[in-house]
Amino acid sequence: MVQSGPHGDGCLSDPRKLPLWHSIYITYSSYFRHFRDVVRVTWLWIVLVAAMWTVAEWVRWSWAISISEQYKKGTIGDTGASPVVAGSLYVFAALLFALALVDIAVAWHRRLILAERPRFIGSHFATAIAWQYFAVFLVLTGAAAIPPALLYAVSMLDLESLPETLADIVAAGFIFSAVFATFAIVVRFSLVLPARATGDHDSSFMKSWKATRGNTWRLLWATLACVVLPALLLELPLAWFGLPSDRPSPTEMFTTDVPLQRIVKSSLGMPLQLVYQLLTLPICIGYLSYCYQYFARRE
């Protein structure tokens, strides 16, 4: 169970405010303290997703190299079914990744909130919990798409009649408003996710919105620290090793000898990103779990 403690951040005088630094500390400490359970709920999904994506990359590049060699010799024959097979494998890998996200999220919510030991990987899909969780996630995704859609509609307006500086200010204002509105919708409605994962059907989107009132900016900074920061940390080692490199274009494949090292680097980037995202997903889920417990105690 996610532990609570001294809040700090001035929240003892105003219990309505999320304790920012304490929430960040609890999120990371629970992740590393229960890292053995993190491995338990992620390892098989990591193996399946990485293997499926790697096989798809191997089929794709084997076919591309074979066709490019035939093209250079002027002996192109039947292209075969490899592109269809590779495309199907990519789709299957993406579906596996989506299922992994849901299963890991539900398992980690229940580990932190209910102190439930991790079950066999994928077992939550035998119950309604995982599917309800997935449904809430789809609703949040749809709601988050509304501000960008409105921004696109606004972008169709003719701003050329305005002075250039004013037009830039108006455009920047629209973009900031869309980004902030998207964030506010997602984080303030997101308490429904841990609620569904733990079987709490009394929580609703409206209750989540009301419970987080006055905490939008604190939720923003905590989200940056617990969700965005781990994602950014991946980019540093990838950039250091030059991953992922640019994928060779079809023109390059057919007209030049593309180094094998470049093909390998362009293929390794995505599997590594998927593995890292699955392994660090419990950090984000731990943050949501703590927020749910904190605001639920206030209700």
Image (tube, rainbow, N blue to C red):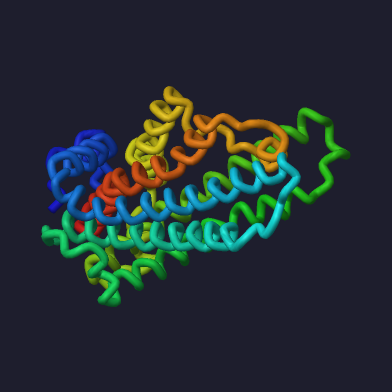
Asked where in the image residue 272 lies, by quadrant, the reply is: top left
- Asked if residue 276 is positioned above or below residue 187 in the image, the reply reads above
Picture coordinates of residue 40, whole percent (x, y): 18, 53
Q: Is residue 91 visible?
A: yes
Left or right of 7? Residue 63 is right
Picture coordinates of residue 158, whole percent (x, y): 84, 46
Nearer-the-camera pick, 123 or 184: 123
Left or right of 271? Residue 17 is left
- Asked if residue 229 is positioned above or below residue 149 in the image, the reply reads above
Q: Is residue 12 visible?
A: no
Nearer-the-camera pick, 48 or 142: 48
Picture coordinates of residue 43, whole percent (x, y): 24, 51
- Asked if residue 120 is positioned above or below residue 8 in the image, the reply reads below
Picture coordinates of residue 231, whole percent (x, y): 40, 38
Q: Residue at x 20, y 48 (%)?
A: 39
Q: Residue at x 48, y 48 (%)?
A: 58
